[in-house]
Image (cartoon, rainbow, N blue to C red):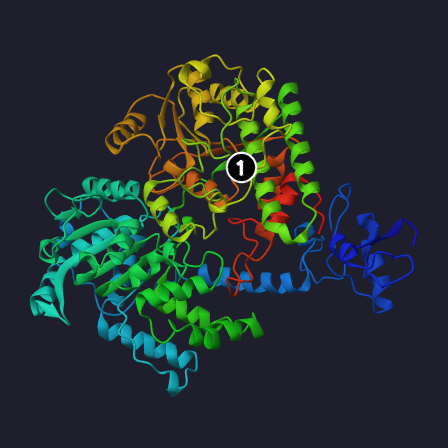
């Protein structure tokens, strides 16, 4: 056919695994890509159909190709859809994506307030203590919580669920679960909803406690115990109560740090006790006071932190005693549907909290037929979970722009030297038995290059490890940018990040990328040419030539002007040092070294004054804060885990925002940053959710060896 050509494609992995003498031995599978002008697509599709040849998604697409179209696929529109995002997906991956799409559709359907029915909400005059009127969706959530905490209504709903899922009598285990999952997206006010619930049910909680002082050896308490991810989020809860509730309405205890109470009787007369997962885990391991009390209600904030059943925080949470249990999380299913089993186990939602029954009645039907087999999962979640997304708020749509940055000549020279050293290290690692060493080499190189993209060529300073103290990585997760004290305690216990589930590279005992005597270490001997990322003193920062990235950020901030307010997020403390020195008093700053009182003062000053810029590290600013005074969000570097960017953006794009928010991302051209952005896009085209944890070894948070190879554009010897 004129204007159409074909090219044979062999996968690199297949060729590498085949016989050495391919010219004389062995059969290697290949695929054929068909190329041509879009005007020829229908003719080519018809010609292939006449010989019963049907086009599949290609494994590979040449960079010069402008898109992938399949004329044989059914489509409603007359114009063919660009299917480039499906390039490289195999049949197993396509099936996984179909299942994932079904799960995502189900999560998007859990806002059906028809199911928020049942007993009328009777709260008396308690809600008069609120200083803020609840929105309609918060009132609906309050009703849902009231329903789920009603024993009779909950049992009726669970009996209905068993019938809908054809549960056999042998599995008809009675469930006394009175609680559920509030899974509203970020910014919809889950915290205020739960605070309102505590106020609305205060009389009922007191009646419940008075019913019996002891139950099965546990002292009853009218208290709601709230477990949060960090001390910073404790501050957020306290701030929300101060903002929305009349003084003296709630009696509150902050159960955290040294000197916390040790006697059960001292904790039974509070309305609300706030603690962290790290403190809860420490109490569990030492048989502390939190597990000697029968609480009226236990609430897990960021409940996905317990999704790993082997973790200390999961065991500590499940071991708590309570009348009612709640999970607050914007991501009830992060990667695997097994994440949901962990939440159901905490909620004591029998029989589906049993992994065997969940497998048989939820996972297996979904695996057999994603279209029809999703009904059981849908009914399960509609019974126990309420979820609404940001569209409910009808906020102004944010706008997005990307600033492309070009490295200066010296920066590019150093960049290429780091890449060359990494390639040599990989070439020296020839055995397939040392895959973890390759991983460490690639991860270390990626970290150095990411820092270089931000910070440029810094003054000569003593060489340090990749994760220098005071910068990201020294006390937390390399993948999700978490580095607070409470997370560090949990990381030290389990070697697993409680937020994103990654095993931490920094905890693996492996050789450094720059062993003694290598060329990269010798960079310290070249004036001005050192490995980037060291911490700068104020004097050093002021005497440093601006990096290409920092100059681009400063220029864009100057363009924004004084009438707008900007949040500037970076993973690197050093980058904030450089920005702060060059913004000449026009900015405020919050990082991990800023204590709570100072942080509150800075946030109040940013919201109430004409200071136009707030600099923040992503690990201190991406969770829990409400910064709707800002209408610009600057993401200085692409994050390995894109959900970190989403959390940062949600600080400004949330309930109460009245202006259009502009999100500006800065990406260095021809660098690992461009490749990280491509990895993010590809992850979005793959299955977001999987049936089990084992099949999700390549998620956007943890990153596989192949992901790192793609980011660095380095071929590995298999």
Q: Closest to the observer: 617 or 98?
A: 617
Point out residue 241 in the picture as x, y percentages from the top left corner: 20, 44
**Residue, x 86% and y 68% (percent of image)?**
50
Would you place residue 669 above or below residue 554 in this image? below
Q: Which image quadrant for residue 73?
A: bottom right
**Residue, x 45% and y 53% (percent of image)?**
501
Q: Closest to the observer: 487 or 252?
A: 487
Would you place residue 317 above or below residue 711 in this image? below
Q: Is residue 98 toward the left or the right of residue 113 in the image?
A: right
Q: Closest to the observer: 247 or 95?
A: 95
Q: Is residue 274 toward the left or the right of residue 638 in the image?
A: left
Point out residue 128 in the picture as x, y percentages from the top left corner: 14, 50
**Residue, x 27% and y 31% (percent of image)?**
595
Q: Quadrant of the N terminus?
A: bottom right
Q: Closest to the observer: 255 or 223?
A: 255
Q: Is residue 510 toward the left or the right of residue 299 in the image?
A: right
Q: Residue furthest front?
A: 516
Point out residue 476 in the picture as x, y percentages from the top left corner: 41, 42
- Badge 1 density bin: few <14, some 14–19, many ≥20, Cα 10 Å: many
**Residue, x 61% and y 17% (percent of image)?**
526
Point out residue 293 in the picture as x, y percentages from the top left corner: 16, 62
Residue 688 seen in the current view: yes
Secondary structure beneath dot 1 equals loop
Q: Which image quadrant for residue 163?
A: bottom left
Residue annotated with mark 1 = 638
Q: Residue furthest bottom?
A: 169
Residue 183 seen in the current view: no
């Amino acid at each position: 056919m004129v204007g159409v050509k074909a090219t044979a494609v062999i996968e690199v992995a297949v060729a590498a695994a085949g016989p050495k003498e391919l010219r004389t031995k062995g059969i290697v599978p290949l695929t054929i890509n068909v190329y041509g002008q879009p005007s020829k697509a229908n003719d080519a599709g018809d010609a292939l159909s006449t010989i019963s040849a049907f086009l599949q998604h290609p494994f590979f697409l040449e960079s010069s190709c402008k898109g992938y179209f399949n004329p044989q696929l059914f489509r409603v529109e007359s114009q063919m859809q660009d299917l480039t995002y499906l390039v490289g997906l195999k049949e197993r991956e396509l099936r996984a994506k179909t299942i994932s799409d079904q799960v995502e559709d189900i999560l998007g359907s859990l806002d059906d307030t028809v199911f928020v029915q049942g007993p009328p909400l009777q709260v008396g005059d308690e809600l008069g203590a609120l200083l803020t009127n609840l929105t309609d969706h918060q009132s609906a959530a309050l009703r849902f919580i009231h329903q789920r905490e009603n024993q009779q209504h909950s049992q009726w709903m669970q009996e209905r669920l068993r019938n809908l899922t054809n549960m056999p009598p042998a599995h008809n285990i009675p469930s006394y679960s009175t609680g559920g999952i509030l899974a509203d997206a970020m910014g919809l006010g889950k915290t205020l909803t739960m605070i309102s619930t505590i106020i609305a049910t205060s009389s009922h909680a007191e009646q419940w406690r008075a019913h019996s002082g002891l139950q099965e050896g546990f002292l009853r308490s009218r208290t709601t115990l709230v477990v949060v991810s960090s001390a910073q989020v404790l501050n957020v809860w306290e701030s929300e109560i101060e903002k929305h509730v009349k003084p003296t309405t709630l009696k509150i205890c902050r159960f955290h740090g040294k000197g916390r109470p040790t006697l059960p009787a001292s904790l039974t007369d509070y309305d609300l006790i706030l603690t962290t997962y790290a403190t809860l885990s420490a109490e569990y391991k030492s048989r502390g006071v939190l597990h000697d009390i029968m609480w009226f209600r236990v609430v897990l904030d960021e409940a996905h932190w317990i999704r790993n059943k082997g973790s200390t925080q999961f065991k500590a949470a499940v071991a708590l005693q309570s009348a009612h249990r709640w999970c607050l999380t914007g991501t009830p299913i992060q990667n695997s549907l097994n994440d949901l089993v962990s939440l159901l186990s905490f909620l004591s939602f029998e029989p589906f909290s049993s992994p065997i029954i969940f497998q048989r009645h939820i996972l297996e039907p979904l695996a057999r037929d994603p279209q029809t087999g999703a009904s059981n999962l849908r009914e399960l979640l509609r019974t126990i979970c309420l979820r609404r997304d940001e569209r409910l708020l009808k906020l102004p749509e944010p706008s997005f722009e990307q600033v492309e940055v070009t490295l200066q000549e010296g920066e590019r020279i150093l960049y290429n030297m780091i890449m060359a050293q990494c390639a040599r290290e990989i070439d020296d690692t020839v055995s397939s038995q040392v895959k973890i060493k390759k991983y460490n080499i690639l991860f270390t190189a990626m970290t150095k290059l990411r820092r270089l993209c931000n910070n440029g060529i810094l003054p000569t300073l003593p060489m340090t490890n990749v994760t220098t103290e005071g910068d990201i990585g020294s006390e937390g997760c390399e993948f999700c940018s978490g580095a607070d004290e409470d997370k560090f305690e949990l990381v030290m216990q389990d070697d697993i990040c409680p937020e994103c589930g990654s095993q931490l590279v920094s905890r693996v005992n492996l050789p450094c990328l720059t062993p003694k005597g290598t060329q990269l270490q010798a960079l310290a001997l070249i004036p001005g040419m050192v490995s980037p990322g060291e911490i700068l003193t104020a004097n050093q920062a002021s005497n440093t030539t601006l990096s290409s990235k920092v100059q681009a950020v400063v220029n864009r901030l100057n363009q924004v002007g004084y009438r707008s307010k900007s949040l500037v997020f970076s993973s690197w403390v050093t980058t904030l040092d450089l920005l702060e020195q060059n913004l000449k008093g026009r900015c405020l700053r919050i990082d991990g070294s800023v204590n709570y009182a100072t942080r509150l003062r800075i946030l109040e000053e940013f919201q109430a004054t004409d200071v136009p810029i707030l600099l923040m590290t992503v690990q201190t600013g991406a969770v829990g804060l409400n910064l709707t005074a800002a209408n610009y969000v600057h993401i200085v570097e692409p994050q390995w885990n894109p959900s970190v960017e989403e959390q940062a953006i949600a600080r400004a794009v949330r309930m109460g925002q009245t202006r259009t928010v502009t999100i500006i991302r800065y990406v260095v051209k021809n660098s690992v940053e461009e490749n990280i952005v491509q990895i993010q896009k590809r992850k979005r085209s793959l299955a977001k959710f999987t049936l089990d944890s084992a099949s999700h070894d390549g998620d956007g948070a943890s990153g596989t060896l192949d992901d790192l190879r793609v980011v660095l554009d380095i071929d590995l010897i298999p």
